[in-house]
Image: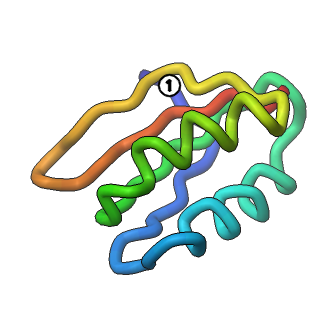
Amino acid sequence: MHFDKEFDASGLACPMPIVKTKKALGDLAAGQVLRVVATDPGSVCDMDAFAEQAGHTLLLSTTENSKYVFFLRKG
């Protein structure tokens, strides 16, 4: 999947993956896509809730090499 920016949140514990994702999205224009890689299992639920509350779209949530990968389109 195409993305405009990537943020690696590996090793960060809740709530830091969401806090840092919010900051990374701030650098993007509406419609651009951010790829986020995380290791915190709690980020799966958190990322979905964050996207909905913040007006972004969670395009894909998957796992790669034991890491959680998210693609968010900035709203």
- Residue depicted at 30% across the width and 64% down the height: 39
Q: Callout 1 environment at 10 Å: few (<14), some (14 to 19), or many (20+)?
A: few
- Residue 33 lies, in percent from the top left, at 65, 32
Colour setting:
rainbow
Amino acid type, residue under disc 1 in the picture: His
Q: Specify the quadrant that holds the C terminus.
A: top right
Relative image position of residue 50 (x, y in whole percent): 68, 43
Q: Residue furthest left?
A: 65
Number of on-image labels: 1
Which SS class for mark 1?
loop
Q: Is residue 46 positioned above or below 12 on the image?
A: above
Viewer-nearest residue: 35 or 15: 15
Q: Nearer the viewer, residue 3 or 12?
A: 12
Q: Image point 46% across, 68% down: which residue?
A: 9
- In depth, the one of 22 and 50 nearer the eye is 50
Direction from residue 64 to residue 24 in the image, left or right = right
Q: Which residue is mark 1?
A: 2
Does residue 54 sit above or below 37 in this rendering?
above
Residue, x 49% and y 50% (percent of image)?
36
- Residue under the point 55% across and 44% down: 47
Residue 11 coordinates in the image, percent (x, y): 34, 79
Closer to the camera, 48 or 1? 48
* In the image, residue 21 above or below residue 62: below
Quadrant the N terminus occupies: top left
Note whether 3 is above or below 22 in the view shown: above
Q: Position of residue 5 (x, y in %)?
A: 61, 48
